[in-house]
Image (spheres, coloured by chain):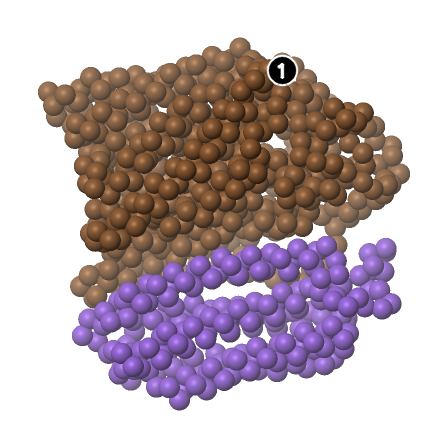
Amino acid sequence: MSNAATQKRALSAVLWDYLTTVDHKKVGILYLIGGGFFFLLGGLEALIIRIQLIKPENDFISAGLYNEMITMHGTTMIFLAATPLLFGLMNYIMPLQIGARDVAFPFLNALGFWLFFSGGILLNCSWFLGGAPDAGWTAYAPLSIQSPGHGTDFYVMGLQLSGAGTLMSGINFLVTIVSMRAPGMTYMRMPLFTWTTFVTSVLTLFAFPALTVGLFLLMFDRMFGSAFFDVALGGNSVIWQHLFWIFGHPEVYILILPAFGVFSEILPTFSKKRLFGYSAMVFATFLIAFLGFMVWAHHMFTVGLGPVANSIFAVATMAIAVPTGIKIFNWLFTMWGGSIVINSAMLWALAFIPSFTIGGMTGVMLGSNVADYQYHDSYFVVAHFHYVIVGGVVFALLAACHYWWPKMFGRILHEGMGKLAFWTFFIGFHLTFFIQHFLGLMGMPRRYWVFLENQGLDTGNLISTIGAFFMTFGTLVFLVNIVYTAIKGEKAPADPWDARTLEWTIASPPAFYNFKQLPLVRGLDPLWIEKTEGNGKMTPAEPLDEIHMPNGSILPLIMTVGFFTASFGFIYQTDHKAWLIAVYAGMALAIGCMVIRSLKDDHGFHISKEELEREAD
Amino acid sequence: MSHDHSLNPKTMPEDPAKATMEGKHKFLGLWFFLGGETVLFACFFGTYLALRNSTAGGPTSQDLFGLDLVFLMTVLLLTSSLTSVYAMYHMKNNDFKKMMLWLGITALLGFGFLALEIYEFAHYISDYGFTFRSSAFGSAFYTLVGFHGGHVVFGLSWLIALMVRNAKRGLNLYNAPKFNTFALYWHFIDVVWVFIFTVVYLMGMVS
């Protein structure tokens, strides 16, 4: 009995630990759990969409529910799955790669996670409260203004919360990388994943405020009677499109650049060669980010901005193919002549290169403003962005899971199941989306609930749906792999892959202070340098001394509960003014937490030298 | 505790706001934050520029704006930025009392600005029936200027909280970065106002 009691206490202690944690590794794991949950939810929605489209004039779900499905699938996958999963990886790995003990603002880091998570929960509450948002993931006005019920209100408030969380993380990563690099870790010695984290954070910082503004305008129009998108009072609905895509286009680079970073870590490790063209890779990352901000109107070619504007944006769009091409060739040259190890992580990386290149090429096709009138709003577009986002981002996430799982959880994922998941998902992916290019070219519009028979669309849609089931199977195998690994998986040493960067110099999983002594970095791929020119271990850059660490805090969670409550108030005060109480109470709670955080001194704590000496290496 | 000692050294370093790691992080983090804020206000300005002539038959900017009031507001806010510079100057000289004095003056000027802005909005609403809902121009005007006003309110609350909390304990390396980041934020609010003065009021008077 006493044993059961200790176990119970241990469980609640672990729970409390995670609710109050400010450790970047635990926050990273929370992000992975949260993002993984929403990824499964978004996948389920995708499967329902594909089942509805398995045959002509199907009535598996109603037209209204179908609109909710496509809206929630897109919104969930972009904002609640892909972004947080990548931010989780960055959170866990980036500080380890630069030899830091935490991020610059650990409290803010935890707050960022809770805001993202509560935003996602808020958005999904809509399913149970009268219907999900149904105006598409882009929520174009005036459709989103006139969409009845509270669905779109949940979209507005949910994304506002999670967007605020993402913005905080962006600032946090920037400061961390600028000021917390280990001695000797100059900018041009940073691993590519850290570089892409840096550039992604810059994009986050400058792109998300545009979404914030767009959501505010939508919120004011829907909840407080303003007239931004109300043509009768002089409003202009194209403003929403501009604001949304000024955010939305950089957002796709926020997703893909960290994916590039992941592959730039995996390919050198398993080719046993340093990354080909390191400086060109860094430069290309910056160039993609820079150009990424001046192409948003290519989503709006058919709006009627005029030939001059359209042409400028078309040229800028196609220019992005150049730095992306530099990257593709550098990855190929990295593998050239290397001694390549093919395992699950490497399979995802190898599959990424051709899959993403197809998505890139259709991107250039869509970037041609004259041809775009033909492709616009067809399944060709759907095929294109799934090739870049699944073939790029999802492949990267799965590759990163296999690669960094041993570091994060101390166990190696099962290879056999990893390969099974890869082959089924990879084949399923191409089955699902390759055919959609042709469905689109034959005129099948996106977002339609049904299609008619004998239009040449029947077989293509059937194949696409079969592919979706393959992908589902692959995902399930991956889930089984996680459970199996947690129970029976092989224990991981500090450096299971014979890798090159700093995160592999410390235990798997690392101690909560990461580095007992900060390492001295002597060049790019610091661990590899020590393996080839030194004794295989990092030289400490400082004598063993006490370590300063931040205190955990429950305030981020309480603050988030405040914002969450206030969001419900904002949504329902249009029905009854009594809901304003929820707004005031929620905001009071959130602001109260801010005041406490600001006024209460929190100096953190020190791990003593003796304690560190007692711990084994 | 070793902490109090390191945060209250016998001789203050030259720049107490950036002498600790936390201070440097706060300084850098706030600059990045202001970068994001710039995009936020740029989007509001863009929206305003697109909608400023969409009056839907209601009052136009020429009907509404009067430069004398706005001039007074500008003087108050710009001066408050200057006084916050004096406060930071005294912080670097480790003269806590003078710093608090100048911060107090900054707060008074900020409240003066805020009072005039509230008067301005009330005047538009009661005398012209020009509201947030009356036209797209109204929505855009109140949103842009109101968001700036909201930033002023937030800044003033922040300043008051800092001054009350630290009134009795003097300057140390733990609170110096807090005062410094406030001052940076306050300058940013001022810069945004310069643009509002130009784009909203001056351009609204002439066109």
Chain that is purple in the image: B
- Viewer-closest of B126 and B175: B175
Chain that is brown in the image: A
Tell me if A271 is positioned left or right of A520 in this view.
left
Tell me if A83 is positioned left or right of A308 in this view.
right
Q: Which residue lies furthest to the left in this view?
A: A454
Q: Which residue is drawn at 18% across and 63% down?
A: A232
Decide: is B16 above or below A465.
below
Question: Can the viewer see residue A520 in this picture?
Answer: yes
The amino acid sitting under disc 1 is Gly
Give the percent coordinates (x, y) of residue A486: 61, 20
Query: Quick one: quadrant of the N terminus of chain A?
Result: top right
Q: Which residue is drawn at 59% across and 60% down?
A: B30
Query: Quick one: quadrant of the C terminus of chain A?
Result: top right
Q: Is mark 1 on a helix, strand or loop?
A: loop
Q: Which residue lies furthest to the right in this view?
A: A610
Quarter location, residue A337: top right
Q: Given the image, what chain letter belongs to the residue carrying mark 1?
A: A
Question: Can the viewer see residue A17 in this picture?
Answer: no
The residue wearing badge 1 is A489
- Viewer-closest of A131 and A191: A191
Give the percent coordinates (x, y) of residue A541: 80, 40
